[in-house]
């Protein structure tokens, strides 16, 4: 599970810069699709691992969390949804490609690298939705 500061920073960046469709993050995911069948974005945190990167007095040691978060774009499985899917995925990737953001007390911020490209295969068509996911690798340094 990621640090709370990582979740806050990622979801804060989406709140500040993403307006194409509603975002369902850790705090706001009720597990259901919109009743009107409209597009939505899910944020998932499938992997995180921490290691100590400095040695010093307790409370003054730097640790590094490395992980990845997934941005799962769900668009209607119609002509308009298909037209939006790849350009929106590109916008999401650009929003997090090689960025540093989210510094809060105790957390020096998050550094992200190159997001994966979305996979398009038989699993992409999921019921009423076309589902595209990208994974964004990150690291975050924090004091403990």
Image: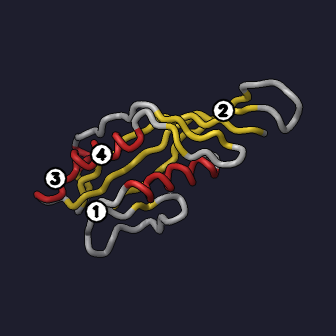
Q: Marks 1 and 4, Cα distance to the nearest angstrom? A: 15 Å
Q: Secondary structure at mark 3?
A: helix
Q: Nearer the viewer, mark 3 or mark 2?
A: 2
Tell whether 4 sits left or right of 46. Answer: right
Residue labelled with disc 3: 82
Q: Are marks 3 and 2 in contact (CB under 8 Å)?
A: no
Residue 8: quadrant of the picture: bottom right
Which mark, residue 91?
4
| First in residue order: circle 3 vs circle 2 | 2
Tell me what residue is drawn at x 37 percent, y 56 percent: 18
- Of 21 and 119, the residue lying toward us: 21
Residue labelled with disc 2: 64
Q: Marks 2 and 1, Cα distance to the nearest angstrom? A: 35 Å
Residue 80: quadrant of the picture: bottom left
Q: Marks 3 and 2, Cα distance to the nearest angstrom? A: 39 Å
Q: Marks 2 and 4, Cα distance to the nearest angstrom? A: 28 Å
- Name the outermost residue toward the right: 57
User: Dot 1, crowdedness within 10 Å: few (<14), some or many (≥20)?
Assistant: many
User: Dot 2, crowdedness within 10 Å: few (<14), some or many (≥20)?
Assistant: some
| First in residue order: circle 1 vs circle 3 | 1
Q: Secondary structure at mark 4?
A: helix
Tell me what residue is drawn at x 37 percent, y 64 percent: 22
Q: Nearer the viewer, mark 1 or mark 4?
A: 4
Residue labelled with disc 1: 39
**In this picture, is 121 found above or below 7?**
above
């Amino acid at each position: 599970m990621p640090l709370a500061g990582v979740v806050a920073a990622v979801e804060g960046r989406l709140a500040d810069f993403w307006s194409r469709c509603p975002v369902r993050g850790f705090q706001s995911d009720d597990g259901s699709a919109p009743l009107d069948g409209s597009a939505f974005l899910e944020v998932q945190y499938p992997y995180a691992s921490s290691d100590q990167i400095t040695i010093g007095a307790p409370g003054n040691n730097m640790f590094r969390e490395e992980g990845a978060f997934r941005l799962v774009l769900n668009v209607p499985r119609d002509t308009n949804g298909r037209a939006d899917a790849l350009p929106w995925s590109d916008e999401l990737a650009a929003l997090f490609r090689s960025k540093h953001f989210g510094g809060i007390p105790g957390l020096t911020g998050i550094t992200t690298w190159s997001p994966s490209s979305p996979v398009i295969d038989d699993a992409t068509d999921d019921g009423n939705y076309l589902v595209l996911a990208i994974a964004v690798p990150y690291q975050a340094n924090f004091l403990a």
